[in-house]
Image (cartoon, helix red, strand yellow):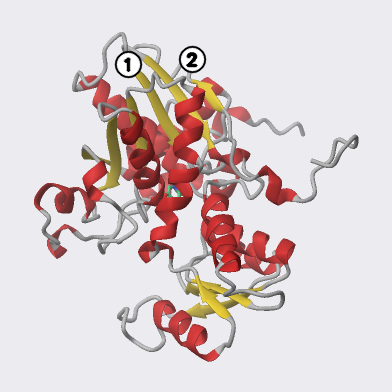
Amino acid sequence: MKEDLQVYDSLLQLVGNTPLIQLNKITEDFKGEFFAKLEAYNPGHSSKDRIALYIIEEAERKGLLKKGDTIIETTSGNTGFSIAMVSIIKGYNCILAVSSKSSKDKIDMLRTMGAKVYVCPAHVAADDPRSYYEVAKRLNQEIKGSVYINQYFNELNIEAHYRSTGPEIWKQTEGKITHLIACSGTGGTISGTARYLKEQNPNVNIIGIDAYGSVLKKYHETREFDSDEIYPYRIEGLGKNLIPTATDFDVIDKFIKVTDEESAHTAREIAKTEGMLVGYTSGAATQGVKQLAEQGEFDENSKVVLIFPDHGSRYMSKIYSDKWMEDQGFFDTKNEVNAKTIEFIK
Ligand code: PMP
């Protein structure tokens, strides 16, 4: 912050230090206290601001990046947006190789943020030269002075959360946290946060949320990659069809799985009960808490922190659209967003 003037030098000073908010209604029937870490308060509206800024600044410290250089990643999701935002502010080019499955809205959003987007065919093998992994790798080799973020296989993804999310939660709960509940995609958030929390108190329970159709839970339990576990599912951002090295399975106590449908209903319920418009995986984390409460995981002394990774505005045409919900067969009689909340005056 500049002296005297109450201004920030740039948005980058606002990355991290997100608020922890008590959940008052959705968890009221459960024993313990529940707090949501609202990562939508980052300037790029998700937890991915932390890793984008941290990994890019590490590359600067190592002398790998200078103004005008290029940053490359393979995502149309939150990470792409955060990298594009940091790149603009710091003066780098940003290239994102994305799957042709990505929505037009998402691609337009990244282009609006100055990124060059390569749209790669979705239905080719990961080692096909046209896949977004291979396109990103090739561009990284071809473009001098480029850095490939590679969030699924980058240890700095874990480190970013070890240095920021973990200490913030420890301080915000005055060391009283008993459980951390976080969705696992790359695994960076849960692993880095857990590593820090376990160093402070090894008894903190770390519970990862996985999707049906993903290999993570089984891998955690057996250390076996079982391709029979893989099938398509709708929640974006959690679960995986490969084992990311950015997940430290040793600091996670257990995984539980949640369904697409229940997670979507729960996200809508959070909006209606807490007034928080949250993303799909925030619904998944809260759905996980519901299941854990039913299994007797919590008691009167539990202080449970849930990571809410992003904002609901990115899902208006998905979980917050009655039409989309019906198309998936997720008919919602309790929490319609549109049906009963709109009247046309003729
Ligand atoms: N929720 C959303 C919406 C995400 O985009 C991600 C990132 N893939 C996650 C949860 C999981 O975070 P992480 O990659 O750190 O495991």
| Coordinates of residue 255 in the picture (x, y in percent) | 23, 41
Per the rendering, the mark at residue 96 is: none
Task: Identify the secondary structure beneath mark 2.
Answer: loop
Task: Identify the secondary structure beneath mark 1.
Answer: loop
Q: How many marks overall?
A: 2
Left or right of 233? Residue 18 is: right
The amino acid sitting under disc 2 is: Asn
Badge 1 residue CB within 8 Å of ligand 1: no
Dividing the picture into quarters, in which one does residue 345 lie?
top right
Left or right of 5? Residue 220 is: left
Dividing the picture into quarters, in which one does residue 80 lie?
bottom right
The residue at the far top in this view is 300
How many neighbours does mark 1 have within 10 angstroms: few (below 14), some (14-19), or many (20 or more)? some
Q: Determine which residue is flagged by label 1.
A: 302
Could you tell me which residue is drawn at 46 percent across and 21 percent down?
Answer: 173
Q: Is residue 146 visible?
A: yes
Per the rendering, the mark at residue 24 is: 2
Could you tell me which residue is drawn at 56 percent across and 29 percent down?
Answer: 276
Earlier residue among tags 1 and 2: 2
Q: Is residue 336 visible?
A: no
The quarter of the rendered structure image containing the C terminus is top right
- Asked if 314 appears above or below 263 in the picture, the reply is below
Viewer-nearest residue: 61 or 267: 61
The residues bearing labels 1 and 2 have C-alpha atoms spaced at a distance of 15 Å
